[in-house]
Image (cartoon, rainbow, N blue to C red):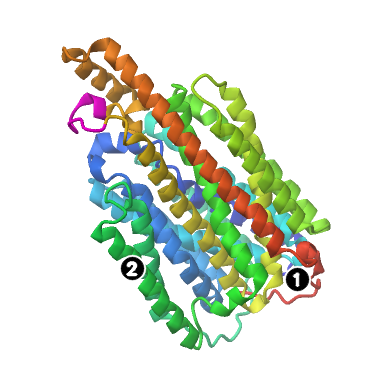
Amino acid sequence: MVDIPYRQKLLVVAGLTVTLFVATMNQTVVATAAQNIVADIGGFDRFVWLFAGFSLAATASVPIVGKLSDIAGRKLVLIGSVVFFMATSAAAGFSTDMTQLIVARVLQGAAFAGVMGSVWIIMAALWAPSERAKWMGVATAGFTLSGVMGPIFGGIVSDTFSWRWVFFINIPTGAFSLLLLWIWFPNVQRDERKGRLDLMGAVLFVGAATALLLALTWGGRDYAWDSPRILGLIVGSLVAFLVFARVELKADDPMLPLNLFTHRIFAFGWLASLTTTSTFIAITVFQPLFVQGVMGKSATSAAIPLIALAIGVASGANIAGQILSRRGYARELGIFGLSIASGCLIFVSWLDSTSSIWSLFIATGFIGFGMSFGFTSFTVPVQNAMPISVLGVVTSTLQFGRLFGQAAGSAVFGAVLFASVAVSFVGLNEDSPQVRIADPGIIVAVDELAEVRSEYLMDPALGEQRYESDLATSRNNLSDGLSTVFLFAAAFSMSGVVLAWFTFSGGTSTATVRRERGTDNTMD
């Protein structure tokens, strides 16, 4: 596809960006609509699986999508994934109870993996290595912006219309992206492919990844880390991964060629994708909780730092893409950007209830700017360093690392936060309002907090003064817990600095421009 006209390339990029934006926004769109969903169909005890189910399915499906793309062709997999995404969105919108909605979200996560993985693969194969970084920066900006816009969009739509339209809106927008792809995506001669989907490897991989993510999701929250269920999941995951590795080493056409990890740039780049993306969760998920729960601001105010994040990501991704495409310096860009992000996360960890939201706004903008440098540096140079014949698997495996990083980061940060706030009122009855007021979900929910206040006022042993005291204690505990979360995120980001040094050492910092311009990028 490198040889198609430049104008047609731009049209294809436009179609891919629209498609990516629509699909990616559904990662986070439910965050602000969850309260309205539970109020309508119930299932508060299971609503967390609206997020966990989506992430589990998406993470486990990404490598499979990459292999299918290499075997069946990019266009077929992408269009099929968009159609499946529209169907699962309709199913989610028509759900009448929480179980149905969770099942629909799991299927939607698999469809999302198909869309996202295909878009990144096509974007990589569309451009010659010397131009790839610039246009991948555009796609990165669209990808990150959509994740930031998700909670804002979900809150507005669910409050103004209905939470069901959070999902129904994907049908017309998905149809529009399909139209763009159908008209602008070129018909390329299909290569003769002898590869077959490694079904045994796919099953083992899905089982191992799912077990590990369930352990990270449940551990320390629903079950103790040393409980038989969590230990069983961890052991089962390790065994499944070992069997998976053995199967892949013997397979004629493995789903995940393990020899990729013998390449230093790929191995370290994949690890960096996993660790640094975890940092993004600390901002998009836990920073709104800081604004509402610690600062006591409204949900609308919580969106202000996310706007700064969007501005920082959009500007940083395009600047990094331009520099990489013209000069290279992948190592320098990664170290510079992730150092900025780490420093700003440490600054955010020092903020408390008396801090200005505009200080948070500025810091978050720089975090987005720095993270976008890291994302871009660990994508294009890694792709360019690997053979074009495995471009699909390389790209999808990098995306798997990022998705797994988001899921694992959410679980780890959540466990850190839970450990901090769970000790607030040890020894009290679980139905006591003093226990409920320690719940971060209660602190940020105006109606539920008012209900807890009423319970305090009706109890002669508590009263208004005790309510104010316990609320202040809970906010302080939440602030301490979130400070720890932000420090953990800074450590994850700093690990990316170290990995950038080793990934691109030995003169490979200019890997983007070192590949020959005539590299074969044939695809279908």
Q: Which residue is mark 2?
A: 235
Q: Quadrant of the C terminus?
A: bottom right
Is 462 on the left or on the right of 2, as rendered?
left
Q: Which residue is mark 1?
A: 3
Q: Residue, x 55% and y 52% (percent of image)?
A: 277
Q: Residue, x 83% and y 57% (percent of image)?
A: 327
Q: Which residues are magenta?
A: 426-435
Secondary structure type for disc 1: loop
Amino acid residing under circle 2: Val
Mark 2 or 1 closer to N-term?
Answer: 1
Secondary structure type for disc 2: helix
Distance, label 2 to label 1, CA atoms, is: 49 Å
Quick check: is 465 in the magenta stretch? no
Q: Position of residue 423 (x, y in %)?
A: 31, 35
Q: Residues within 10 Å of mark 1 (few under 14, many from 20)?
A: few
Q: Residue, x 31% and y 46% (percent of image)?
A: 221
Q: Residue, x 34% and y 57% (percent of image)?
A: 215
Is 513 on the left or on the right of 51, as rendered?
right
Q: Position of residue 212 (x, y in %)?
A: 38, 62
Q: Residues within 10 Å of mark 2 (few under 14, many from 20)?
A: some
Q: Is 86 rendered above or below residue 474?
A: below
Q: Position of residue 46 (x, y in %)?
A: 26, 46
